[in-house]
Image (cartoon, grey):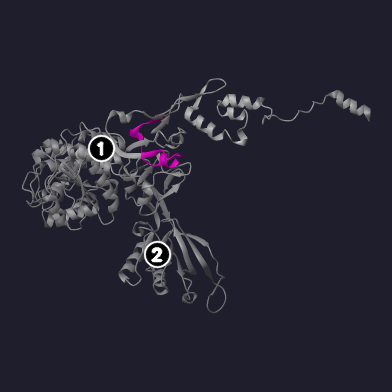
Amino acid sequence: MAKSLITCDCLGTQTIDAEGLSQATGLDVRPPCSALCTTQLDRAQAALEAGDAVFCCTQETRVFEELAEGLDLPAPPTLDLRDRAGWSGDDVPKLPKMSALIADAMLPGEPEKTLDVVSEGLCLILGPAEVALDAAAQLKDHLGVTVLLNDANDVPDTRDFDVVVGKLRRASGAFANFEVVIDALQQIEPGGRGAFTLTDPQNGAKSQCDIILDLRGDTPLFPAHEKRDGYLRADPSHAPGVAAAILAASHLTGTFEKTLYVKTTPLLCAHSRAEQTGCTNCLGLCPTGAITSAGEHVAIDPMICAGCGACSAACPSGAIIYDAPPVDLTMRRVQTMAKAFLDAGGTAPRLLVHDSHGSEMIRLSARHGRGLPADVIPLEMSAIGAFGHAEAVAALAAGFASVTLLPGPKADVPALETQVALTNAIAGAGKATLLDTPDPDAMSDVLYDAEAPAPVATPVRPMGTRRQITRQAAKALHPGTDTIALPDGAPYGAVLVDTDACTLCLSCVSLCPSGALGDNSDKPQLRFQEDACLQCGLCANICPEDAITYEPRLNLTDAALTQEVLNEEEPFPCIECGALFGSKSAIDRITEKLQNHAMFSGDKLRMIQMCDNCRVQAQFHADDNPFQGGERPRVRTTDDYLSKRRDH
């Protein structure tokens, strides 16, 4: 049975084409109500009892949830058509846009992957004595509290909570797993009469806690501290802020679900090989420090990761993929909305990507201003940083005329600017823009004033990895184009080899993490497949002759999918057996350099010109054979033992 859409024109302030939506979406779209949340609440009840209904109103979600709870029914899904489409300054039909929004809402969601985190409520409070001790007194009945003071004279005459004296050297970890290192640590000796005494100072003392309440008013203990779960910080001179932090801390006990934002495939990571550093894109982007080097790949601490998504957008190999929601769902969303808009009769839609802050801006603009133009389709992302160049190019190839990113206050704007620049390099100048404003009216003005570029002539919806989708989408956007020049640092391009300098040592082949560089087991040859190249820098870093450089570009020809020969030489025949090994130039160069060396006098120089088998044979039969041992002792027999016994 098709889902039923319960629509409402909100007291006649918007127009709902129920029949057109029903035809465009294939759903049972009911004639619109006018006051579904008040005088026509009986219609909402009937829809809930009938089941399988979607309410096209998010403003009154609480009313519908309470109604469902009273009927002992599950809460209905809701969909915002009014703020995102109905309330608009455009006096044109909103059918294509509403069809796109409905199609997006009907896509099946992906279950969120989470990790259980258990907090026992162990809380460390930092700050001036008067503020920290007062906070401890308020929290002692809810948490296991320890206050760290700097001055022994501030130790209170109470054992309602723990107090220690010392200096915090460092803190690491995250919610339910913080580790602190304290120098000059002194603990209270609870026995004896009079004032409490303290133990001798101890440096480097380590301890664990679940929560850190930082009331110092000093430099935060962590980068992007507002994204570090379990770390609560407030200015000690701001009483409301301190009170809010104390209240938040009091609730941090029990079992919590930590979202796993990304999934990693270490084998694909191009960070390092043989102690040579390659790609560091994600290390420089992570605001919380959750990504660290772990040898040949990077490691992500899921407890510290705040899910900004920038690492996924910048990863050239797919070793890091955003998973909340998955990248393939994001691709399906943009492709589905573009198709629904065009199928409903719309032309040249524009995509507006935003986060929850952007949703609030859209609501304010719709209620008090012009709202969004009828051709601007909003796409809300939990993390706008995860919407990179691959997603943007896929949207343009699917039929969107342009892509605009609307970052919220917590977004990494420089990282988004990099992705926008790469999108424009691939798709064409002006196809992607960054709209960085906190003003809803300014947002609307920019969108209304902008002219939509011409969309792709034949929309496509490719599938696969982010790299594969980018390539196929670029081919659709630039039919007949062979290569597209890209800016430095782009994850696509060619490896250029100086054949005069290259000795075909093939060190680059052994280090290449993607298999873009390869050899030939039959002859000295360096092969290259451009489609697989990540431009990570490893081969250039390892090359002993500095023979490798890069050309950032996107090769759209089929040649990029095949191996081409970058350098090859005549193989050298073994002077003993004739077997081919190595390259002639390399053997000749080594022979020339060592011909006057004392260690290679006489026949030893000839061994350089032998294959492995013949070289071993020559060494074995040489007078100074390094494998030759001393004369083996004669095996003793029974007669030897009996003869020795007779002699005695």
Q: Nearer the viewer, residue 482 or 35?
A: 482
Question: Callout 2: few (<14), some (14-19), or many (20+) C-alpha neighbours within 10 Å?
Answer: many
As displayed, is residue 145 above or below residue 44? Answer: below
Visible in this render: residue 575? Answer: yes
Find residue 164 and report its horizontal and vertical position in percent: 49, 69
Would residue 503 be counted in the magenta stretch?
Answer: no
Location of residue 568 in the rendering, given as x and y in whole percent from the top left corner: 42, 28
Give the number of the mark in front: 1 or 2: 1
- Tell me the SS state at disc 2: strand
Which x, y percent locates residue 104? 20, 41
- Amino acid at dot 2: Leu
Give the structural element (helix, strand or loop) at label 1.
strand
* Left or right: 423, with 494 as reference point: left
Residue 492, numbered label? none
Q: Are marks 1 and 2 in contact (CB under 8 Å)?
A: no
**For residue 213, which numbered disc appears in the image?**
2
Which callout, 1 or 2, points at the residue further toward the start of the chain?
Answer: 2
Where is the N terminus found, in terms of image quarters? top left
Q: Is residue 397 above or below residue 633?
A: below
Residue under the point 41% across and 72% down: 128
Residue placed at 42% from the left, 73% from the top?
Answer: 129
Residue range in magenta is 526-549
Q: Quadrant of residue 360?
A: bottom left
The residue identified by callout 1 is 484
- In the rendered view, tell whether residue 281 sits above or below residue 179: above
Q: Residues within 10 Å of mark 1 (few under 14, many from 20)?
A: some
Q: Nearer the viewer, residue 268 or 191?
A: 268
